Image: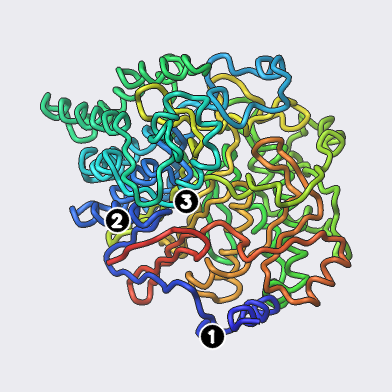
C-alpha cells in the first residue's frame, strides 16, 4: 500500500492532527481576493475582473460566463443558483435563476407519450434558460463593472479557445445523439464527414453564433448607456434583449423547429428571484442554503439531527460515524423526495416543520443503530408547524410506489453528473457561492443563438403520490439538486462552499462541513478528505432510481470497517473518488486572510491575491 493509502486508511478511524494531514493541492492563500471555479481558464476570467478593480460578484459573473462557454458540464441555456453575502447589509441573499417548464409541459402531455418522467435529453427536456438572467441580475444588483467587461472573456472564448480533453470526451461519447439536432452537430462536430468528426484536445474550438449572441448583449448595454441610462438600467436593457427581443425570437424559433415547447410568452414571464435563504444553527455557526426549489435544506435538516450526537467521539469515518451519516441522510433525502418543490406554486412546502429542531430530534430518535433500515421514508413535519398533513394518504403508499432498482452503482453515473461551482470573495467582504448547471453535453442548441438548452425538466415527477409538490406544470420550476452553501460565525463570513455532482452534492457538503467543524481539518484537507455516499435516496435524473443499502466508500477504508458495515446490512462499493470536486473559501478572522480550496477530484482551479 502507498503512503497515501496508509494515510487514508488511518483517517477512516479518526482525524489526524491538522498539521499531519497532507493534501494533493495546497491551500490557496489570499489577502485581497479569491476566485475559484471548475476550469483553470474560468478562474483566469475571474482574476481578470479583480485586475480591473471589480468585486467578487463581477468575478463570479465572469467565471459563470466562461465556464458556460466552455461547456463545463453546463452552458448558457442552463440554470444558476447562488448565495451572496452583502457586507453593506450583513445579510445573505439567494439568487433563484432556475428555468421553468414551458407552455404545454403538463403531466398529461408526458403521460400521453408513455413516459414515467419527462425525458432526459432533447428539446422536451428543456426548461427556459436561467443562466443569462441570473448573471445579469447579480451583476446589475451587486456588481460594479459593466456587462461588456464581464462578458468579454466569454466572447473571446466563443470566438475560439483551446478545447480541453474532458469536453472532447463528452462530445465523442454523445456524438450519435448530437447528430439528431442540426445546430448542435454544427458546433460539436466541426469535422463532419471526416474520419474523426469531433475536435481534439488543444484544437481551437469556435462558437461563432454564441459569440454573436453575447455581442448583442454588449451592444444592448452600449445603446442604453448612450441613451443616458444608468449602469444598472443598461444591464437590464441587455436582459430584455435576451428574454424579449431578437435573441428570444431566434431561441424560440430554433427550439420549436426541433420539437421543443418554449414560447415568447414563457421567456417574457420568467424572472429571477432575489430571495431569503433558509438557515439553521449548528454549534454557534449559521449555515445558509437556498430553499425547497433545490435540495439544499437537506443539509440543514441533517445538521439539526446530528447536532446532539457526539460525532468526534465516534471517530472520523468509523463504522458508527458512517452508519449515523447514512441513516440521517436517508431520512432527510426521503423528505426531499416527497416535500420539496417550487415555493412559488401551491401547495406550500412545510419548511418550518422540516427545519425545526424538534422534528429533527424526533426523526433521529428512530435510528436503528444495529442495522440499516432499507425502508426509510418521509416523515411528517406538519405537526411541528401546528398543521395537519394534507397528503397523509400518500405517505402510507410512498414505499410501494418507489420500489428499489436493480443493477450496479456503476449504472448511476447520473448521480455525479452535471454542474460546476464558483467561489469568489474580496477584501470588501463580498462573498458569492454559485452552483450553475444545465445544458451539458449533449445539449440541443437553440437555432442560431449558440445557446445550449437545459435538461432540467427530467427532475419533475408525474405522479402526485411520489411528490405532490414537484408535479410538472407550465411556469413552474423543477426541484433541482443544485445547492451552494455559506456559513457565518458571529455575523461574519466563515465558509463559502459548493460542489458538483447531482444527488451527491449535499451528502458531500455535509461531510466537508463536519470535517472542518468537528474534526479540525483545514479547508483544503476538508475538500480532499474521503467521503461516503448513499444511493438509497431517489435519484433526480433519468428513471429516478433508488438502491437501498448501497454505500460508496473510499478505497482506503480498512477491512474491519468494511466487515462491520456489511454486518449492518450494507452493500459496499469502492472508488478512489467519493465526491465531486468541492470548492470552498475559509475566512481567517484572526489574520484577516482568505483560504481557498479546490479538491483533487476534477479540474477545479483557483487564483488568489
- Residue at the disc numbered 1: 20
Q: Where does the image place residue 128, in percent across and percent down from the top left? A: 47, 26
Q: Toward the viewer: 200 or 187? A: 200
Q: What residue is rendered at 68% in x and 29% in y?
A: 461
Q: What residue is rendered at 33% in x and 54% in y?
A: 41
Classify the position of the N terminus by image quarter: bottom right
118 sits left or right of 150 in the view: right
| Kind of element beneath mark 3 | helix
Q: What residue is rendered at 50% in x and 47% in y?
A: 169
2 or 1: tag closer to the N-terminus: 1
Q: What residue is rendered at 55% in x and 23% in y?
A: 101
Compared with 31, 138 (above or below) is above
1 or 3: tag closer to the N-terminus: 1
Q: Toward the viewer: 38 or 11? A: 38
Q: Toward the viewer: 200 or 46? A: 200
Q: Where does the image place residue 556, in percent across and percent down from the top left? A: 68, 74
Classify the position of the C terminus by image quarter: bottom left
Mark pair 1, 3: CA separation: 33 Å
Amino acid at each position: 500500500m502507498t503512503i497515501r493509502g496508509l494515510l487514508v486508511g488511518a483517517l477512516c478511524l479518526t482525524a489526524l492532527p491538522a498539521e499531519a494531514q497532507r493534501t494533493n493541492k495546497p491551500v490557496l492563500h489570499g489577502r485581497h481576493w479569491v476566485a475559484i471555479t471548475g476550469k483553470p481558464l474560468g478562474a483566469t476570467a475571474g482574476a481578470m475582473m479583480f485586475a480591473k478593480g471589480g468585486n467578487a460578484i463581477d468575478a463570479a459573473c465572469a467565471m459563470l460566463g466562461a465556464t458556460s462557454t466552455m461547456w463545463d458540464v453546463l452552458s448558457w441555456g442552463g440554470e444558476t443558483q447562488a448565495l451572496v453575502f452583502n457586507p453593506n447589509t450583513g445579510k445573505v441573499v439567494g439568487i433563484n435563476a432556475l428555468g421553468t417548464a414551458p407552455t404545454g409541459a403538463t403531466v398529461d402531455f408526458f403521460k400521453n407519450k408513455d413516459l414515467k418522467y419527462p425525458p432526459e435529453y432533447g428539446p422536451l427536456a428543456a426548461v427556459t434558460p436561467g443562466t443569462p438572467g441570473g448573471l445579469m441580475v447579480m451583476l446589475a444588483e451587486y456588481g460594479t463593472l459593466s456587462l461588456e467587461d464581464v462578458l468579454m472573456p466569454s466572447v473571446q472564448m466563443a470566438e475560439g479557445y483551446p478545447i480541453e480533453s474532458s469536453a472532447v470526451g463528452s462530445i465523442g461519447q454523445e456524438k450519435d445523439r448530437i447528430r439528431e439536432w442540426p445546430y448542435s452537430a454544427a458546433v460539436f462536430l466541426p469535422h463532419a464527414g471526416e474520419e474523426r468528426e469531433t475536435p481534439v484536445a488543444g484544437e481551437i474550438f469556435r462558437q461563432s453564433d454564441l459569440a454573436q449572441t453575447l455581442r448583442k448583449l454588449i451592444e444592448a448595454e452600449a445603446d442604453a448607456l448612450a441613451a443616458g441610462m444608468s449602469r444598472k438600467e443598461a444591464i437590464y436593457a441587455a436582459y430584455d434583449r435576451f428574454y424579449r427581443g431578437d435573441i428570444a425570437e431566434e431561441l424560440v424559433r430554433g427550439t420549436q423547429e426541433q420539437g421543443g415547447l418554449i414560447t415568447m410568452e414563457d421567456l417574457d414571464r420568467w424572472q429571477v428571484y432575489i430571495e431569503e435563504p433558509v438557515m439553521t444553527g449548528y454549534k454557534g455557526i449559521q449555515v445558509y442554503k437556498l430553499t425547497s426549489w433545490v435540495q439544499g435544506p437537506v443539509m440543514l435538516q441533517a445538521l439539526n439531527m446530528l447536532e446532539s450526537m457526539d460525532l468526534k467521539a465516534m471517530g472520523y469515518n468509523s463504522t458508527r460515524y458512517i452508519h449515523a451519516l447514512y441513516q440521517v441522510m436517508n431520512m432527510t433525502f426521503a423528505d426531499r423526495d416527497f416535500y420539496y418543490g417550487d415555493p412559488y406554486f401551491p401547495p406550500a412546502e412545510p419548511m418550518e416543520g422540516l427545519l425545526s429542531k424538534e422534528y429533527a430530534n424526533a426523526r433521529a430518535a428512530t435510528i436503528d443503530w444495529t442495522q440499516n433500515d432499507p425502508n426509510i421514508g418521509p416523515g411528517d413535519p406538519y405537526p411541528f408547524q401546528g398543521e395537519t398533513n394534507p397528503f397523509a394518504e400518500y405517505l402510507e403508499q410512498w414505499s410501494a410506489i418507489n420500489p428499489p432498482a436493480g443493477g450496479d452503482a456503476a449504472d448511476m453515473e447520473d448521480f455525479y453528473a452535471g454542474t460546476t461551482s464558483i467561489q469568489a470573495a474580496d477584501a470588501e467582504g463580498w462573498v458569492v457561492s454559485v452552483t450553475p448547471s444545465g445544458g451539458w453535453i449533449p445539449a440541443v442548441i437553440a437555432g442560431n443563438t449558440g445557446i445550449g438548452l437545459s435538461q432540467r425538466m427530467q427532475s419533475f415527477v408525474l405522479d402526485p403520490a411520489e411528490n405532490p409538490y414537484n408535479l410538472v406544470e407550465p411556469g413552474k420550476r423543477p426541484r433541482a439538486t443544485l445547492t451552494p452553501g455559506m456559513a457565518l460565525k458571529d455575523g461574519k463570513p466563515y465558509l463559502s462552499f459548493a460542489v458538483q455532482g447531482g444527488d451527491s452534492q449535499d451528502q458531500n457538503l455535509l461531510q466537508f462541513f463536519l470535517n472542518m467543524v468537528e474534526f479540525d481539518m483545514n479547508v483544503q484537507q476538508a475538500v480532499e478528505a474521503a467521503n461516503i455516499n448513499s444511493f438509497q435516496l431517489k435519484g433526480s435524473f433519468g428513471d429516478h432510481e433508488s438502491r437501498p443499502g448501497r454505500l460508496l466508500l473510499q478505497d482506503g477504508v480498512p477491512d474491519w470497517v468494511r466487515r462491520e458495515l456489511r454486518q449492518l446490512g450494507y452493500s459496499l462499493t469502492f472508488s478512489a473518488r467519493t465526491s465531486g470536486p468541492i470548492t470552498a473559501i475559509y475566512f481567517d478572522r484572526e489574520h484577516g486572510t482568505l483560504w481557498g480550496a479546490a479538491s483533487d477530484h476534477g479540474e477545479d482551479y483557483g487564483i488568489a491575491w
